Image: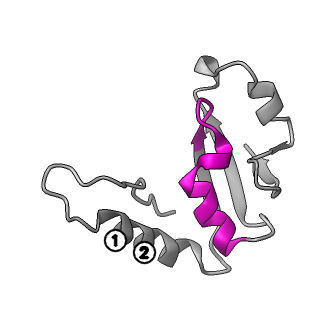
Amino acid sequence: MVDLPGITRVPVHGQPEDIYEQISKIITEFITPEESIILNVLSAGVDFSTCESIRMSQRVDKTGQRTLAVVTKADKSPEGLLEKVTADDVNIGLDIPTQIL
């Protein structure tokens, strides 16, 4: 298991200007191989259809067969969480169901 860095778009505290490109490249290198399983950790409070991590995983796993979604902070979730998450899958708004743990 490899814990990959979070996606950073704005450089802070002396990070390089191309931090987003660097992190995207690292993540893509690890999630692209067919033998990789992608564990996509999502906060219940975010709009799944706008998550960069979902977009990245869908780019390399078009069927969703290698992607597992874990939804965190369900206790602090906004209204509508039940519509976003079901017992068997999570609708991430991009027409590819992913397994939910």
User: Dot 2: what SS?
Assistant: helix
Q: Identify the residue at horizontal 82%, vertical 54% (top origin).
A: 97
Residue lying at the far left of the rendered structure? 14
Q: Identify the residue at horizontal 62%, vertical 18% (top origin).
A: 75
**Quadrant position of residue 72:** top right
Cα distance in 3D space between marks 2 and 1: 5 Å
| Residue 46 position in % (x across, y down) | 59, 35
Q: Is residue 85 above or below residue 8?
A: above
Q: Identify the residue at horizontal 63%, vertical 38% (top origin).
A: 47
Residue lying at the far bottom of the rendered structure? 33
**Badge 2 density bin: few <14, some 14–19, many ≥20, Cα 10 Å:** few
Q: Is residue 52 magenta?
A: yes
Q: Is residue 31 above or below residue 96?
A: below
| Residue 71 position in % (x across, y down) | 65, 37
Looking at the rendered image, the quarter that the C terminus falls into is top right
Instruction: Name the chief secondary structure element in magenta.
Output: helix
Q: Would residue 93 be found to the left or right of residue 32 on screen?
A: right
**Quadrant position of residue 53:** bottom right
Q: Amino acid at mark 1?
A: Gln
42 or 2: nearer the viewer: 42
30 or 58: nearer the viewer: 58
User: Dot 1: what SS?
Assistant: helix
Which residue range is magenta in the image? 42-61
Residue to which mark 2 is pinned: 25
Q: Is residue 82 above or below residue 18?
A: above
Q: Which mark is residue 55?
A: none
**Badge 1 density bin: few <14, some 14–19, many ≥20, Cα 10 Å:** few
Residue to which mark 1 is pinned: 22
Q: Would residue 5 be found to the left or right of residue 16 on screen?
A: right
Q: Amino acid at mark 2?
A: Lys
Contact, CB < 8 Å: mark 2 with mark 1?
Answer: yes
Q: Is residue 57 magenta?
A: yes
